[in-house]
Image: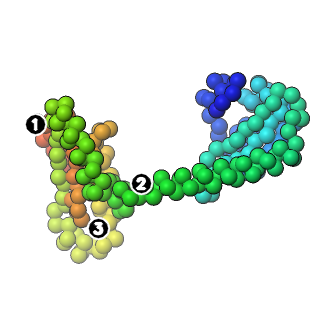
Amino acid sequence: TAGLYSKHLEDTVVYTGEGVVGLVLDTREPLIIDDIREEPGFGNDDVLGLYMRSLMILPLCAGGEILGAVVLGDKSSKAFDEAHLHIMTVLCSQAEIAMENALLHERLRRMSYLDSLTGLLNFSRFNQMAAELCQRASEENHPLGLILVDIDRFKFYNKRYGREAGEMLLFELAGRVEAGTRKGDLVARYGGDEFILLLPGVEGSRLREMAENLRDRVH
């Protein structure tokens, strides 16, 4: 948010279907309101009505998802018309294309370093991040704990119950392994049925305790 009333609006939460902005997000149709204080169902009950009278609201969508809305307001009534709406529709369309490209780029970037089955880091990305952690730990003289996890008799399980069941097992195990980590820990899929954890600041008895807790959760 920007402008004279940005501080009043920046903490405002908008829910789909609630309030005038929520209505636009729900219908995904732009809206011009000549005077919100005279609009049935809104008026001063809507936070925008406390500061503005005229409103023009346009939804921002990308990839079929609602990302937000563009809201223009004026203290006077009947400040916006169809010509203004046309201009803003064109600008919003350009913004939607830019946001959709940015979202696609971010998804592709994330896909490049995540394991497609488990959602954990893949080993290539883990190596890169681990090198940075090791360098930092060396400079700050802090310990790093390492835990390796694998599934006993996983090949037998796959052979008996099938590949799909094996993939479900790996997915659930990955969730249990990740659930026991802290912010800043690294956890990745190391190989077919193997996982690896790098734990900054952990060594000795604490490391053994974390490994045992992990084994208990999996068991």
User: Who is closer to the viewer here, 10 or 22?
Assistant: 10
**Residue 205 appears left or right of 134:** left
Give neighbour class at mark 1: few <14, some 14-19, many 20+ (Cα, 10 Å).
few
Which residue is label 2 attached to?
Answer: 110
Q: Type of residue at label 3?
A: Gly
Which residue is label 3 attached to?
Answer: 166
SS at badge 3: helix
Give neighbour class at mark 3: few <14, some 14-19, many 20+ (Cα, 10 Å).
some
Q: Can residue 95 be seen? A: yes
Residue at 81 percent of width and 50 percent of height: 86
> Alpha carbon of mark 3 to alpha carbon of mark 1: how far?
33 Å
Q: Type of residue at label 2?
A: Arg
Residue at 23 percent of width and 75 percent of height: 159
**Disc 3, disc 1: CB below 8 Å?**
no
| Nearest-to-viewer mark from 3 and 1 | 1
SS at badge 2: helix
User: Who is closer to the viewer here, 9 or 20?
Assistant: 9
- In the displayed structure, 151 sits above or below 207; it is below
x, y percent for residue 140: 19, 31
Labels 2 and 3: the sequence-earlier one: 2
**Disc 2, disc 3: CB below 8 Å?**
no
Q: Quadrant of residue 136?
A: top left
Q: Type of residue at label 1?
A: Gly
x, y percent for residue 118: 34, 58
Which residue is label 1 attached to?
Answer: 204
